Amino acid sequence: MNGKDKIPYNLEAENYIIGCMFIEPNIVSEVLNRLSPDNFYSKPNANIVKAISNLYSNNEIIDQVKVSDELERMKLLEATGGINYIFDIINSVPSVASVEAYIEIIEEKALLRELYYTAQKIQTEVVKDELPFTTSV
């Protein structure tokens, strides 16, 4: 990857979706049905979504305290930025309208990253002449 490459992601959309899951727990199901932690470029955000997913699959309440506890149990709270990062995300959400549009943004960016990484891998293999390429005539 050269210095001109920009990995596709949208941190604001990621933060918005996470904040909305705290503010409006009814959307957690919709979000988790469409997005996985791997769809989030930001590692702290992916960690939070993983914690929310764990809690949701165990039918537990989704709130700042429970998510922080789950991150601590996963030994990821500090790496995620602590409880202050979670509060910052929640406080950055102006409203829970437009959730669908932000889910679509994250889906699009995740797909573009996957394509980017696949292209990079192919490029590396071509340069190293390691592609298993055969021709039949």
Image: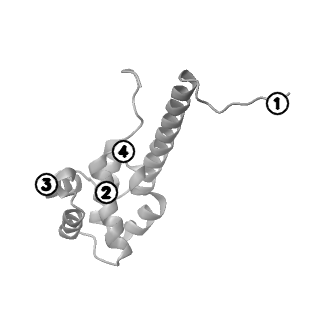
- Separation of marks 3 and 1 at Cα, in angstroms: 60 Å
Which label lies toward us, 4 or 3? Answer: 4
User: Which of the 4 quarters of the picture holds residue 132?
Assistant: top right
Badge count: 4
Q: Which amino acid does label 2 sit on?
A: Ile
Which of these two is toward me, 48 or 15?
Answer: 48
Identify the residue under disc 1.
136
User: Would residue 87 appear left or right of 116 to someone viewing this image?
Assistant: left
Mark in front: 4 vs 1: 1
Q: Upstream in the sequence, badge 2 or badge 1?
A: 2
Which residue is nearer to you in this view: 12 or 126? 126
Instruction: Look at mark 3 in the image and give the residue it sits on.
Output: 84
Quick one: quadrant of the C terminus? top right
Residue ID for mark 2:
18
10 Å neighbourhood of mark 2: few (<14), some, or many (≥20)? Answer: many
Q: What residue type is labelled 4?
A: Tyr
Give the image location of residue 43, x and y in percent: 30, 48
Q: Which quadrant, please, contains the N terminus?
A: top left
Distance in Å between CA atoms under marks 4 and 1:
41 Å
Dot 4 or dot 1: first in sequence order is 4
For the residue carrying disc 1, how many other residues have a C-alpha within 10 Å: few (<14), some (14-19), or many (20+)? few
At x 45% / y 55%, what residue is drawn? 100
Check disc 3 and give the amino acid type.
Asn
